[in-house]
Amino acid sequence: DSTAGTNSDCQPCPCPGGSSCAVVPKTKEVVCTNCPTGTTGKRCELCDDGYFGDPLGSNGPVRLCRLCQCNDNIDPNAVGNCNRLTGECLKCIYNTAGFYCDRCKEGFFGNPLAPNPADKCKACSCNPYGTMRQQSNCNSVTGQCECLPHVSGRDCSACDPGFYNLHSGQGCERCDCHALGSTN
Amino acid sequence: LPTAVTPLPPGTHLLFAQAGKIGHLPLEGSSMKKEEAKTLLHVPEKVIIGLAFDCVDKMVYWTDISEPSIGRASLHGGEPTTIIRQDLGSPEGLAVDHLGRNLFWTDSYLDRIEVSKLDGTQRRVLFETHLVNPRGIVVDPVRGNLYWTDWDRDNPKIETSYMDGRNRRILAQDNLGLPNGLTFDPFSSQLCWVDAGTHRAECLHPERPGSHRALEGLQYPFAVTSHGKNLYYTDWKTNSVIAMDLAISKETDAFHPHKQTRPYGITMALAQCPQGHNYCSVN
C-alpha cells in the first residue's frame, strides 16, 4: 500500500529473480505475474504443463522445473505428458508404460528405449492353444510366452519333437510311435 | 489480478487459455485492442486447455487437465465453479450448444466424446470407438451438427455427426498432419481447422462439396476461433494469438501475452448470440 506513508509501504515481490507481482484487490493476496520460464503459480511454486519439479521445495528438496523425462516415448503434440510435481509420465506411446515410459506395456515385449519406434515394443501374440490359461502376456524383454507342457517356441505355437496335437489346448501329447516301425 | 472474474465491458472479446489463466483481448471490428488485454481469471493450480463460451448466460467454460475437471465462470463477475470432476482422463476440446443448452467435450485419455447439460447433469458418452487423439470440437446448433478433430499420427481425420451422435462420418482425412483445432462460423456457415503438421488452415462449407480451400504458412497452431472473415489461432511456436484474414489469405496481426508460455484454447465471446433456433431448444 503506497498511500499509507510509512517506510514499509512498498515491499519487494516474493517472486523468484525479483520478477513482478500484483495484489489481488479483494483478498490482498500477493501473486507473482511473471514467473521464470517453465514455472507458474501464485509464488512460482509450480511447474508449467510439459515440465516437472518442485521449484520452491514445497514438498521436499528443491527441484528445478525440467521438461518431462519420458525416453522419447511421448508425443510433443500431446498436453499433460507428465505429472508436474513427480514427473510421472502420463501419456506413454509406442506401446510403452511405466513411470518414465521405460518398459513395454502389458501384452508387449522388446526394447522400449530403441531409437526407432518400430523396434520398440511388439505384441506378445501368444498362441492361445499353447499358452497357460490362454494368456496374452509374455516376458517383457524376451517375449517368451508361458507354454503348456511339451509346447515350445517364443509364442508357444509348436510342439516339442516327438509330440503332437497343439490344438488340444492341454499341451502336446506324446506321439507314442512304435520304435521298430518308425524312422525316428 | 482476478481469482474471480471482473466483469467485462460490452463488446466482442477473444478469450484464450494459458494453462493457469484465462486472458481476454477486446476486438474492435477485426483488429485486436492489444493494449486493453487483461487477465480474466487466475487459477494457477489448474492447467486449462479447452475454452468455450455461452452467449446466452455470458459464461466461459473450460477443461482442466490437472484435476482433471470441467468448470465455468460468469463474465458478469463471480467465482469459478467446477461442474464435472468424475470420470475424466484428459478433457481437451470443449463446445457449447447455446440453443439446446448442452456441453460437448473430447477426452484424449479415455478416447471419448461426451455430452452433458450446461450444469454437468444428464451426462452421456456419445462416442468411444475409433478415437485416438480427439482434440478440437465445435457445434453448429442451428443445423444440429457436431464436428471434431483427431490428430492420430497414423490416421488424422476431421469427423462429423448429428448432435445426438447419429450419422457419424469422416469429413476429411486426406493431406492432414496434426489437426489440433477447429471452428464453425455461424454467419458464413464455414468450418475451418488448423493443422500443426501441415502448417495450414483449411476451410469448407460442410454442405457444399468443392468449397474446400487452404491457407499456408501457419507456425504451430493449437486452437482456433473465427469471426467474420477473420481467424484467430493460438500458436505454440511463438506463444502468441495470431489473427488471419481469410479474404486475403494472410496473417494480419499477432498478440504476445506478457507471460511467455504456451497458449491453449481460444474462443470468441460475442456480445449477442447469433440468430437461430433448433428442435432441441423447444423439445
Image (spheres, helix red, strand yellow):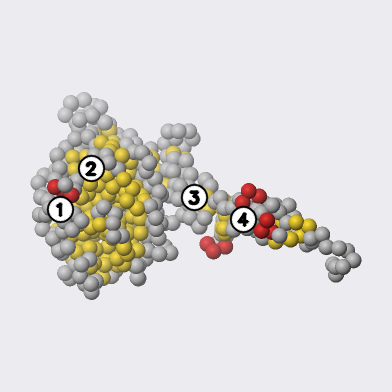
Q: Amino acid at mark 3?
A: Gln
Q: Amino acid at mark 4?
A: Pro
Q: Secondary structure at mark 2?
A: loop
Residue beneath disc 2: B118
Q: CA distance from mark 1 to mark 4?
A: 53 Å
- Residue A106 in view (yes/no): yes
Q: Is residue B215 left or right of residue A173?
A: left
Name the residue: 22% across, 52% down.
B267
Give the mark nearest the N terminus, 4 or 3.
3
Chain for numbered disc 1 = B
Q: CA distance from mark 3 to mark 1?
A: 48 Å
Residue beneath disc 4: A128
Location of the C terminus of chain A by quadrant is bottom right
Chain for numbered disc 4 = A
* Residue B233 coordinates in the image, percent (x, y): 25, 58
Judge if badges 4 and 2 mark residues of a common chain.
no
Using the image, determine if residue B212 lies above or below residue B3.
below
Q: Is residue A104 left or right of residue B81?
A: right
Q: Secondary structure at mark 4?
A: loop
Q: CA distance from mark 4 to mark 2?
A: 48 Å
* Residue A141 coordinates in the image, percent (x, y): 63, 54
Residue beneath disc 1: B278
* Residue A171 coordinates in the image, percent (x, y): 71, 54
